[in-house]
Image: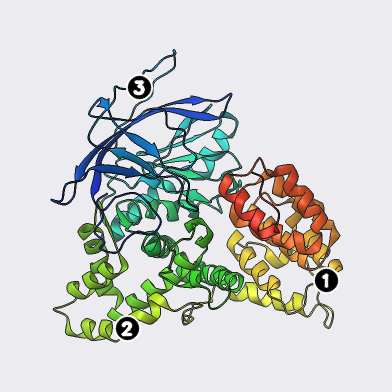
């Protein structure tokens, strides 16, 4: 995707501002025994400016380059010394070229063509023993054979409804198919929005269809992030803020407006935790952080998601929902198949509403600098708490359990959705004083949290137990950390287990570190302050 930004992307060493990739042909073989990918990549490049370009500089990281050519002829090339955290630039002279790399072996060949331009971070390859099943007229579920039936049941009821509802908010889905690939448990994210095939964690296959809202988020990425992409990692909120906004508009369209705010309440709690973790004045809590010389993975948190959502909801309230609804398809049409910066978004918004004096006045009153560059929490919105009040009420009874007559029973949460349990447990985690070992154990036994197949619930309950120093959850927490690699659960649980029993936390990490994705492993090493293996 060609850059539209004038600001230099500080997280690349490439000369992307001189050359644009018009097509990429990728031919890879998978070596399962050695856990390697090998092959060749052919890039079609075009100069952006009239100024002659004498070299190509590409980003690489721990990549073994054997041969490089230009126009099928030899050329001069060199992998330059590594510079953390950006990697090792590959410098290629455009004055010579080499022959194509030879291919050998009798392997199966799979091919595909993607006609919509995408940024490089969205290119992904999955290989293994994969089975597939239909979950809708334009959707397929793919996963390991033993998980296929459970995954099919989990997603077949809602996926097409999500697509159609999102089309009514934005416009027609552009990618022809929307498919899901359920990955092994080491996958570090809830989902990854790779075009055509969303990659999702197996923790979404919980047997209760309570985690399919991941589809709402990743499907929304088909417009925000995939079709319209942030120009730099500093503008990452344009991807995730817009996606979270569309996700919650989708929930409101399907289930009612209170569900939008209920999801936002959960998101606000996550935002508060991220700001607390970084610190109120930390650079990474800004909507547009300065990531110069930083690894963008270190800046990853809920801040761009939830602060971005809060800002877009605020803009919606300023201009009015009916008018804002007209801007949504305009935005995704204007910047389709392009990347953009935050300043371009601001300029386009003003341009769109230029003939509307009332909307223009409201936009001029927005403190853009404050929203873009101030660290910490934004002003807290007023939420519709109708779906959350029952959760808060039950939490309040648990907080006073020692001073009043309260006999917990399974009926307390009868008929609750999993997200209501999540809000309840979030409230318990926020108690000024921990629940206490005996009461924490009683809660888990009464409400069946120990036996829940929904990781959103068990992980939060284990957090309550760890804070209460309830030893009954220590080993189950360690077991969960060996079964799941999703960072949303892994990082908080390691921090909580470390505070309760550092020896067990370190032993658990040592046992499972090779199971985790490299990004997850690196961040947990920092969280636990352990020396990284070289």
Residue at 29 percent across and 42 percent down: it is 56
Of 377 and 242, the residue lying toward us: 377
The C terminus, quarter of image: top right
Q: On the image, numbered disc 2 is attached to which residue?
A: 366
Residue at 53 percent across and 72 percent down: it is 268
Q: CA distance from mark 2 to mark 3?
A: 56 Å
Extreme residue toward the top, this view: 106
> Looking at the image, can residue 177 be seen?
no
Label located before the other in sequence (2 or 1): 2
Instruction: Judge depth for marks 2 and 1 and give the one in front.
Output: 2
Label located before the other in sequence (2 or 3): 3
Across and down, in percent, residue 374 comes to 44, 79
> Looking at the image, can residue 285 be seen?
yes
| Label 2 SS | loop
Q: Is residue 474 above or below residue 78?
A: below
Across and down, in percent, residue 41 comes to 34, 32
Residue 474 falls left or right of residue 141: right
Residue at 78 percent across and 60 percent down: it is 444
The figure's colour scheme reads rainbow
Mark 1 crowd level (few <14, some 14–19, many ≥20, 10 Å Cα): some
Residue 99 found in image quarter: top left
Across and down, in percent, residue 218 comes to 43, 52
Residue 85 falls left or right of residue 6: right
Of 474 and 266, the residue lying toward us: 474
Label at residue 436? 1
Q: CA distance from mark 2 to mark 1?
A: 46 Å
Q: On the image, numbered disc 3 is attached to which residue?
A: 101
């Amino acid at each position: 995707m060609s850059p539209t930004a004038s600001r230099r992307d500080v997280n690349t060493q490439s000369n992307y501002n001189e050359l644009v990739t018009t097509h990429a042909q990728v031919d890879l073989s998978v070596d399962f025994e050695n856990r390697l990918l090998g092959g060749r990549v052919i890039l079609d490049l075009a100069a952006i400016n009239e100024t002659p370009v004498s070299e190509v500089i590409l980003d690489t990281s721990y990549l073994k380059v054997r041969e490089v050519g230009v126009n099928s002829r030899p050329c001069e090339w060199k992998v330059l010394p590594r510079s953390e955290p950006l990697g090792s630039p590959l410098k290629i002279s455009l004055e010579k070229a080499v022959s194509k790399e030879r291919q050998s072996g009798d392997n199966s060949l799979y091919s595909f063509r993607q006609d919509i331009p995408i940024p490089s971070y969205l290119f992904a390859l999955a290989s293994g023993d994969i089975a597939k099943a239909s979950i809708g007229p334009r959707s397929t579920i793919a996963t390991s054979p033993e998980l296929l039936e459970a995954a099919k049941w989990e997603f077949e009821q809602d996926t097409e409804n999500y697509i159609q509802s999102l089309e009514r908010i934005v416009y027609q889905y552009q990618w022809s198919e929307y498919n899901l690939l359920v990955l092994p448990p080491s996958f570090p994210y809830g989902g990854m929005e790779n075009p055509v095939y969303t990659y999702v964690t197996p923790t979404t296959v919980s047997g209760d269809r309570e985690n399919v809202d991941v589809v709402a988020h990743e499907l929304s990425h088909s417009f925000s992030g995939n079709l319209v992409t942030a120009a730099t990692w500093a503008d990452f909120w344009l991807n995730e803020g817009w996606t979270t906004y569309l996700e919650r508009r989708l929930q409101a369209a399907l289930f009612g407006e209170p569900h939008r705010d209920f999801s936002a309440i959960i998101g606000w709690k996550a935002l508060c935790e991220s700001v607390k973790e970084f610190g109120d004045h930390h650079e990474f809590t800004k909507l547009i952080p300065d990531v110069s010389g930083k690894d963008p993975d270190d800046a990853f948190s809920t801040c761009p998601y939830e602060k971005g959502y809060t800002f877009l909801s605020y803009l919606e309230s300023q201009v009015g929902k009916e008018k804002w609804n007209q801007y949504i398809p305009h935005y995704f049409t204007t910047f389709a198949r392009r990347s953009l910066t935050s300043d371009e978004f601001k300029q386009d918004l003003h341009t769109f509403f230029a003939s509307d004096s009332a909307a223009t006045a409201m936009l001029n009153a927005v403190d853009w600098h404050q929203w873009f560059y101030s660290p910490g929490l934004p002003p807290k919105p007023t939420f519709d708490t109708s779906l959350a009040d029952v959760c808060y009420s039950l939490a309040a009874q648990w907080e006073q359990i020692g001073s009043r007559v309260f006999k917990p029973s399974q009926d307390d949460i009868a008929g609750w959705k999993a997200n209501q349990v999540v809000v309840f447990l979030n409230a318990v985690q926020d108690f000024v004083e921990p629940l206490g070992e005996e009461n924490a154990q009683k809660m888990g036994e009464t409400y069946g949290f120990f036996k829940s197949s929904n990781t959103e619930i068990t992980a939060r309950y284990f957090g309550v137990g760890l804070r209460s120093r309830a030893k009954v959850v220590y080993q189950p927490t360690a077991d969960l950390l060996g079964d799941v690699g999703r960072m949303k659960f892994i990082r908080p649980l390691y921090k909580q287990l470390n505070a309760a029993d550092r020896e067990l936390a370190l032993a658990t990490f040592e046992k499972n570190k090779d199971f985790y994705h490299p990004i997850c492993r690196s961040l947990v090493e920092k969280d636990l302050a352990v020396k990284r293996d070289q």
